[in-house]
Image (cartoon, grey):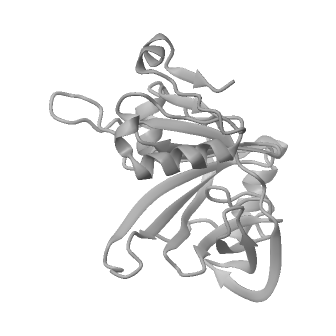
């Protein structure tokens, strides 16, 4: 799908109402799940609502599933049971705070994502009529990503955690091209920017707790079918029993 907006119209609706005007950018994400067998390709559709103050990045299916008061159509299985979304992760940004929510088993871990440090490269090209420049970053987990961004849309935002440049990010890919994200549509939006309201949420003090929980799950997925094995920043086990989950659907780590 082509971006159905010209630079004149983009600047027009950004200026209306000052910084609070909301833009909607739709992205397509392609993930090669097996670097050897590249035919195993997963494709996801996501939406970014943003202005100069805040943003929310999510899949429409996840928003319909978790924010039941939204206008999204909820997909159902036989019997009218809501269908679990293909992608449940999301990112909410408020000023300089970037809050990421990612699944580990049946639970959603929410943590503060560290900001990326960007290096602006010399490459330039037009993307759907927007003059774009290339930037490079290395994440906290050591992976190299490249991002094409445009100053024609001077909002320092983009898909997932790829934010903080001087303009909107239109394309992102990692070094070995197993992850690629492309903007497909840009338009004005009347929607409210808000985080997803997860019901099985685990709020952590740091990203390290999420990474440790994900590692434990990958080594033994069954531990998340009963007790939820977690560790604090000092390595102390902070296991939450399923009985605790019944008392409160939202778990906080001390």
Residue 227 lies in quadrant = top left
* Residue 159, percent from left and from top: 62, 58
Left of 140 or right of it: where is 188? left
Q: 143 and 155: which one is in front?
A: 143
The C terminus lies in quadrant: top right
Instruction: State the residue lying farthest toward the top.
Output: 247
Q: Is residue 58 above or below residue 192?
A: below
Residue 101 lies in quadrant = top right
* Residue 124, percent from left and from top: 74, 87
Q: 215 and 3: which one is in front?
A: 215
The residue depicted at 61 percent of the width and 36 percent of the height is 231
Residue 31 lies in quadrant = bottom left
Q: Is residue 239 above or below residue 175?
A: above
Q: 33 and 44: which one is in front?
A: 33
Count of labels in the image: 0
Q: In this rendering, does residue 87 appear at all?
A: no
The residue depicted at 82 percent of the width and 78 percent of the height is 120
* Residue 234, percent from left and from top: 72, 38
Q: 88 and 70: which one is in front?
A: 88
Instruction: State the residue lying farthest toward the left.
Output: 78
Q: In this rendering, does residue 16 appear at all?
A: yes
Left of 139 or right of it: where is 64? left
* Residue 8, percent from left and from top: 74, 66
The residue depicted at 81 percent of the width and 51 percent of the height is 15
């Amino acid at each position: 799908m082509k971006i159905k907006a010209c630079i004149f119209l983009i600047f027009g609706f950004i200026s209306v109402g000052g910084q609070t005007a909301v833009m909607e950018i739709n992205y397509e994400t392609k993930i090669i799940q097996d670097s050897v067998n590249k035919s195993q390709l997963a494709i996801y559709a996501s939406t970014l609502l943003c202005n100069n103050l805040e943003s929310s990045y999510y899949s429409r299916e996840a928003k319909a599933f978790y924010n039941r008061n939204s206008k999204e159509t909820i997909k159902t299985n036989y019997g009218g049971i809501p269908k679990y979304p293909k992608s449940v992760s999301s990112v909410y940004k408020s000023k300089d705070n970037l809050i990421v929510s990612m699944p580990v088993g049946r639970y959603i871990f929410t943590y503060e994502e560290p900001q990326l440090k960007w290096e602006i490269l010399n490459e330039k090209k037009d993307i759907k009529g927007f003059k774009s420049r290339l930037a490079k970053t290395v994440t906290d987990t050591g992976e190299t990503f490249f991002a094409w961004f445009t100053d024609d849309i001077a909002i320092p935002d983009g898909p997932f955690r790829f934010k903080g440049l001087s303009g909107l990010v239109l394309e992102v890919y990692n070094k070995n091209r197993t992850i690629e994200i492309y903007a497909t549509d840009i338009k004005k939006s009347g929607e409210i920017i808000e985080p997803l309201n997860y019901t099985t949420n685990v709020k952590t003090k740091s990203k390290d707790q999420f990474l440790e929980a994900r590692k434990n799950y990958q080594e033994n997925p069954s531990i998340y079918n009963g007790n939820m094995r977690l560790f604090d920043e000092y390595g102390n086990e902070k296991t939450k029993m399923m009985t605790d989950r019944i008392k409160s659907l939202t778990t906080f780590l001390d």
